[in-house]
Amino acid sequence: MEHPAWTLSGLCVIGGSMGYLRKKSVPSLAAGLIFGGIYAYSGYLLHNNADNGLELALGASSVLFATGLIRGFPSRFTKPVPVVLTVLGGLGSLYYYKKYKEFYP
């Protein structure tokens, strides 16, 4: 269950770094590093069966999904970044919500 968190961590760090390298966007870099760190920490917690790892991954995915929606509506999802944020956040939210329901029926 920690593998999706680590994958999302890597994708967030890569995406934020790409935003910085291509457009010198410091907010993209900061968001990528923050979300990457949150996902990495939740993956660490999930790997060690510690408390709150699942909730942390679900929360980060939900915020990523909401961010993608907020950035995507003005452009009608014609730009790639909001689409990627929405898809990754949505998939992460669905996965971790399903896992949450399995553990806490």
Image (cartoon, rainbow, N blue to C red):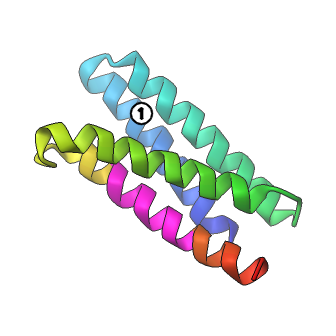
- Along the horizontal axis of the image, is 77 left or right of 3? left
* Above/below status of 65 relative to 32: below
**Residue 45, position in %: x, y?**
81, 56
Asked whether 88 or 16 is in front, the reply is 88
Q: Residue at x 16, y 37 (%)?
A: 74
* Above/below status of 20 relative to 10: above
Q: Residue at x 35, y 23 (%)?
A: 20
- How many numbered circles does the render carry? 1
Secondary structure that dominates the magenta span: helix
Q: Which residue is mark 1?
A: 16
- Along the horizontal axis of the image, is 56 left or right of 89? right
Figure quadrant of residue 5: bottom right
Q: Residues within 10 Å of mark 1 (few under 14, many from 20)?
A: many
Hey, what amino acid is under mark 1?
A: Gly
**Residue 21, position in %: x, y?**
32, 24
Seen as rendered, the residue at the extreme front is 105
Asked if the magenta segment contains residue 94, the reply would be yes
- The residues colored magenta run 85-95
**Residue 54, position in %: x, y?**
72, 62
Asked whether 17 or 57 is in front, the reply is 57
* Above/below status of 96 relative to 77: below
Q: Residue at x 23, y 44 (%)?
A: 72
Element carrying mark 1: helix
